[in-house]
Amino acid sequence: MRSQQVLVLLCVLKAAMSAASLDLYAAVGGRIVIPQETRLEHSTGTLCNPYTWRYEKEPGVGLKEIAQVTHVCGKTDCRWPHCSLTSNGSLQLEQVTQNDSGHYTVTTYSTAKVQIQERTFVLHVLVPVSHPMVGLACPPGRDPVVTCSVKGGTTPRTLLRINGVEHGQKAERSDMEVTVPSPAPWNISCSTENKVSQKTARVFYKACPDPVSRPAVEYLCTPDGSVEISCTVQAGTDPVFSLTVNGVTWGSNVTSSWVISGDDLERSLENPLNVSCMAWNLLNQVQSPYQLIQCPAISGSLSVSSAALTGSLSVSSAALRKQLGVCHIYVTIFLFVFYNLLLVWSVAWERRRRRPSA
């Protein structure tokens, strides 16, 4: 009787262990291997252990059979297009999406088709967290305020530290705001994470920064047919600039100056250009109103004057070359005669010097 009770208890424990599920996590677009934990007695030869993989979105909802491996050894086909089975029966998923989240159950059998074990895994496919953005605001007459925001990620948990001191416990939220009573400087660290990713942003402030003011666009049409466009702000700490010309955004930089030719735009600069400048820093971003820029026609109104100028220059340059050629001949003849006279005089002088005196 006692042995029967022990046997029943063991069966209950085995059933409880089989029914227990295990949480697994994967990143969107990543790869996950859901293990087949039961050691198969026979995995090679003529007769092998059968096993079956099933999927449910929720228990009892949308039951699907992913793979059924019979007693035939070596048959490891998977019925989903983005899954496969390893040699030991583990389920491997590629390029997972959030639609792949759900319950995956593997049931293993003996060669006599008696169930050995059944194991369920709950897969959670999460979006990785984005890089946190740290900001600092200094309202007049009030303590500075540090913010940390995370734009993307499934259930991100955020932790903010200022000068090594933790100013907020990890919580499942994407935005944090902390008032800082301590004086500058501030060494700020903001970390965010979930089950599949972790990102940290670190910023050092010597003092309270200033937001950027509205940028102004200035331009200069150059004689070579290009236009130099610059973007300036009256105020702002460490501003960064970008330029938009006819709907196309040029790369951001801190020099706020761009030289653009017609070849860059695949059009003539004689046509109006619709230009706007964006300026930003860690506190804010401001865009200038769009304005039209048009350079004078290089080959139009300037063609007549340039042709006349070219003609006059060609005539004068030809006359100048002719005059320089004549002068060059005269100078060459003069130097030749002068050199020979100097040579004759030197020889005569040397002979008189060596002549014995009477």
Image (tube, helix red, strand yellow):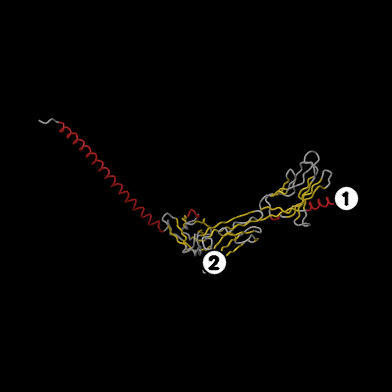
Q: Amino acid at mark 2?
A: Asp
Q: Which mark is residue 2?
A: 1
Q: For this view, does 284 lie left or right of residue 53?
A: left
Q: For this view, does 142 lie left or right of residue 96?
A: left
Other-residue count near label 2 (Cα within 10 Å), few / some / many at <14 / 14–19 / ≥20: some
Judged by depth in the image, the label closer to the viewer, 1 or 2, is 1
Q: Amino acid at mark 1?
A: Arg
Q: Is residue 274 visible?
A: no
Camera-side residue of 288 and 6 = 6
Q: Which mark is residue 143?
A: 2
Q: Which mark is residue 304?
A: none
Residue in view at x 20 percent, y 38 percent: 342
Q: For this view, does 349 lie left or right of residue 252?
A: left
- Distance between mark 1 and mark 2 Cα atoms: 74 Å
- Pick out the residue farthest to the bottom: 141
Camera-side residue of 26 and 97 = 26
Q: Secondary structure at mark 1?
A: helix
Q: Position of residue 310 (x, y in %)?
A: 36, 53
Q: Position of residue 351 (x, y in %)?
A: 16, 32
Other-residue count near label 1 (Cα within 10 Å), few / some / many at <14 / 14–19 / ≥20: few
N-terminal-most mark, 1 or 2:
1
Residue in view at x 78 percent, y 45 percent: 69
